[in-house]
Image (cartoon, rainbow, N blue to C red):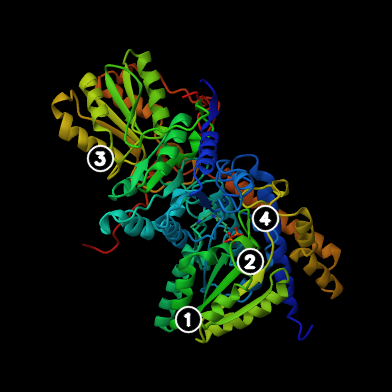
């Protein structure tokens, strides 16, 4: 490896990888209790991308996402307690129980919202970047989406506009090869998705999304480019979803993807691979790892307790927030 | 003929027969050939009919709707499937500006015989972007036919009639109906796209409903009959047109009406039905008409709020009983063993 990353950055990224994994695992374990009553898309196996990207983001940078957003939200600093309470439909949830897993938000850390209609937040992120550019600020917008979302017209329209205006936005495509049960080859020709960015005359790159340091290095360039006003970038990362499309289980029995394919990707687990690297580099011992796990497990347990102990929204909330109250005097 | 099958199997059977009967037909939708086959409704059809008749597609609702229109102009008869009506919103331009008007704006020189299945539903945290019932929007657009079959029998017959029709037809299917069984003939048959059905007869009040709300209305009719109120239950089935003759004949018998729809009350199907009733049956009404639909708010995800959001049989029964001054006689709702109401009532299994 050329110039190695800062030790603290590496350890922080490992901890964040582990944290995202343990959160998703805990949700999967508890989901079948039927207390989290909303569709939930886990990002297990894809954690390296938000971790590597977010390592460069400041609190006032903005992030938008889609249906598989737990990792994006947590890595940007979104409150775990509020996220779990949201999954439990509680008043303390980040959207007050109105949104569930598919509509996370935490403005205190710049997580501007996630929405499950494919590609719908891409143009919204571009709009935020436009406003930032018009104000002359050095903030950056990151928009996350999957390979499926790149098939929507709005993706192409938003890319075009972002490029014309050279906006401070980084498009992060998590290409996990599937859209629900449909593999990439029935939906797209054989070309990198990042090439669509090139066609729109923006910086574009494509790399392994399971290597957190690869992600980190690519994101470094893209985010710097955006920050200094050199325009948008699309980064495509190849990765793999371990769990079923939506829900806490595996789905290998459905036969739309091969067990051997999943097994091969599990061999390339972003978490295990990075743990091995850090152990080999003498930055982590198995004992450190265990301690870290215990610490995160505690955090996760506490967040679940918080969520489960929280009250449901009261009835008056049903009709609240349809229209905002007027803040400016008449 | 008394074979009973589930609503979802009736859809699958209809499509299999449509594909077999007419080589011009095909099915396209996200995941249509996939292992779960759009809630089972397209399962294994690609295996049976081949890769040229049953297609997956990119997540490109807008373009693919135009593509389907293009094929239909050259003689094909596509069935386009949207797993949720909310996803179909990305296809509104081709649907509303093009498909709905192609026949009219080119002076009748062409037809656009598309059938578009849109799935609606409720419950289990579907939330603001996965649960809408936008039939009123679509019915508002001249040129589109919109139907909402409730029974397994009707969904098969209406789907077959939709594909046979030269107009574009939107078929709205409620997910909570998928597991409900009904008597379905094995052969192909058509159910007209413009007629309501009287599904229960009574003399005191008319309960008119769409789709899943028809089941809630039947349940409400049971509750009402416990207090001596007999309801006429009308399954509207078609929105284009709303079958006014059937409605007004019922109101002539009962003098009272409660309409319920899976969509929002305001500016919706309920509003339109009541406008029609006010225009044409005003003198026969013994009391102001009532409507039961969704409140004017997006769908909340939390089960605690969703419970308050979705109307049930009791809301319909209460509205009807109030018209008769008999609300105080209604028995308390039986909640069953379910803590939350975000799953279908276990008694809704048919046959209907
Ligand atoms: C407009 C629209 N069409 C269809 C869907 C249904 N849908 C939800 S997630 C999904 C798969 C998207 O795949 P991808 O973007 O690759 O993300 P992944 O689930 O693989 O993370 C689909 C088709 C949707 N949410 N919105």
Q: For the residues labelled 2 and 3, say whether their Cβ atoms are less than 8 Å apart.
A: no
Q: Are marks 4 and 3 on the same chain?
A: no
Image location (x, y in percent) of residue A183: 64, 59
Q: For the residues labelled 4 and 3, say whether their Cβ atoms are less than 8 Å apart.
A: no
Eye-nearest disc, 2 or 4: 2
Label 2: element kind: strand
The verdict on label 2 being within 8 Å of ligand 1 is yes
Compute the Cα span from label 4 to label 1.
36 Å
Above/below status of B39 relative to B28:
above
* Residue A113 shown left or right of residue B138 in the figure: right
Which of the 4 image quarters holds residue A196? bottom right
Please report, as a chain letter, where disc 4 is located: A
Please report, as a chain letter, where disc 3 is located: B
Above/below status of B122 relative to A145:
above
Q: Which residue is mark 2?
A: A175
Above/below status of A276 relative to B83:
below
- Looking at marks 1 and 2 on the same chain, the residue that comes earlier in the sequence is marked by 1
Instruction: Please report the residue visible at 26 percent of the width from the left and 28 percent of the height from the top.
Output: B247
Instruction: Please report the residue visible at 72 percent of the width from the left and 66 percent of the height from the top.
Output: A15
Label 1: element kind: helix
Q: Nearer the viewer, residue A61 or B203?
A: B203
Compute the Cα span from label 1 to label 2.
22 Å
- Looking at marks 2 and 4 on the same chain, the residue that comes earlier in the sequence is marked by 4
Q: Nearer the viewer, residue B253 or A110?
A: B253
The quarter of the image that holds ligand 1 is bottom right
* Residue B204 shown left or right of residue B163 in the figure: left
Label 4: element kind: helix
Image location (x, y in percent) of residue A153: 46, 67
Q: Which residue is mark 1?
A: A163
Q: Which residue is mark 4?
A: A23
Q: Which residue is mark 3?
A: B272
Eye-nearest disc, 4 or 1: 1
């Amino acid at each position: 490896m050329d110039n190695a990353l800062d030790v603290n950055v590496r350890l922080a990224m490992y901890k964040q990888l582990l944290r995202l994994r343990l959160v998703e695992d805990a949700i999967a374990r508890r989901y079948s209790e039927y207390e989290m009553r909303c569709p939930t898309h886990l990002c297990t196996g894809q954690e390296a991308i938000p971790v590597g990207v977010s390592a460069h983001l400041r609190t006032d940078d903005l992030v938008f996402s889609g249906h598989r957003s737990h990792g994006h939200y947590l890595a940007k600093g979104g409150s775990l307690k509020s996220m779990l309470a949201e999954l439990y439909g509680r008043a303390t949830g980040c959207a007050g129980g109105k949104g569930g897993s598919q509509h996370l938000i935490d403005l205190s850390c710049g997580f501007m919202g996630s929405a499950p209609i494919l590609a719908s937040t891409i143009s919204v992120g571009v709009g935020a970047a436009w406003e930032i550019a018009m104000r002359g600020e050095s903030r950056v917008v990151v928009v996350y989406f999957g390979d499926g979302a790149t098939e929507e017209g709005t993706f192409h329209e938003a890319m075009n506009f972002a490029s014309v205006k050279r906006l401070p936005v980084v498009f992060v495509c998590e290409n996990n090869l599937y859209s629900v049960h449909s593999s990439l080859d029935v939906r797209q020709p054989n070309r990198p998705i990042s090439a669509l960015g090139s066609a729109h005359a923006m910086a574009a790159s494509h790399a392994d999304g399971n290597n957190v340091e690869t992600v980190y290095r690519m994101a470094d360039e893209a985010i710097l480019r955006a920050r200094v006003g050199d325009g948008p970038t699309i980064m495509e990362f190849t990765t793999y979803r371990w769990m079923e499309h939506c829900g806490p289980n595996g789905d290998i029995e459905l036969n739309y993807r091969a067990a051997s394919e999943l097994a091969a990707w599990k061999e390339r687990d972003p978490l295990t691979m990075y743990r091995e690297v850090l152990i080999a580099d003498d930055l982590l011992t198995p004992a450190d790892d265990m301690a870290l796990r215990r610490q995160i497990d505690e955090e996760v347990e506490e967040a679940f307790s918080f969520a489960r102990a929280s009250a449901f929204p009261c009835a008056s909330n049903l009709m609240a927030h349809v229209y905002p109250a007027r803040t400016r005097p008449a | 003929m008394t074979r009973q099958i589930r609503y979802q199997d009736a859809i699958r059977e209809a499509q299999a027969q449509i594909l077999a009967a007419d080589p011009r037909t095909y099915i396209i939708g996200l995941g249509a050939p996939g292992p779960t086959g759009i809630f089972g409704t397209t399962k294994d059809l690609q295996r049976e009919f081949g890769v040229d008749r049953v297609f997956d597609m990119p997540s490109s609702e807008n373009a693919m709707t135009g593509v389907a229109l293009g094929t239909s102009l050259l003689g094909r008869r596509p069935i386009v499937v949207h797993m949720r009506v909310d996803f179909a919103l990305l296809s509104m331009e081709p649907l509303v500006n093009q498909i709905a008007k192609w026949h009219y704006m080119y002076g009748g020189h062409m037809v656009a015989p598309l059938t578009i299945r849109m799935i609606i539903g409720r419950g289990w945290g579907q939330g603001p972007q996965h649960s809408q019932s936008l039939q009123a929007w679509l019915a508002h657009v001249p040129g589109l036919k919109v139907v909402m079959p409730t029974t397994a029998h009707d969904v098969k017959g209406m789907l077959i009639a939709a594909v046979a029709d030269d107009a574009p037809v939107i078929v709205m299917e409620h997910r909570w109906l998928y597991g409900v069984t009904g008597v379905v003939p094995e052969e192909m048959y058509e159910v007209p796209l413009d007629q309501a059905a009287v599904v229960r007869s009574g003399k005191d009040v008319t309960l008119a409903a769409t789709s899943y709300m028809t089941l809630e209305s039947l349940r409400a009719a049971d509750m009402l009959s416990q207090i001596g109120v007999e309801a006429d239950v009308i399954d509207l089935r078609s929105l284009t047109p709303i079958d006014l003759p059937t409605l007004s004949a019922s109101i002539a018998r009962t003098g009272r009406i409660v309409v319920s729809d899976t969509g929002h009350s305001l500016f919706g199907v309920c509003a339109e039905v009541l406008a029609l009733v006010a225009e044409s049956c005003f003198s026969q009404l013994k009391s102001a008409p009532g409507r039961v639909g969704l409140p004017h708010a997006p769908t909340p995800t939390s089960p605690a709020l969703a419970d308050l959001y979705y109307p049930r049989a009791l809301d319909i029964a209460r509205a009807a009983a109030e018209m008769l001054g008999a609300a105080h006689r209604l028995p308390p709702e039986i909640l069953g063993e379910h803590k939350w109401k975000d799953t279908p009532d276990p008694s809704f299994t048919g046959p209907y």
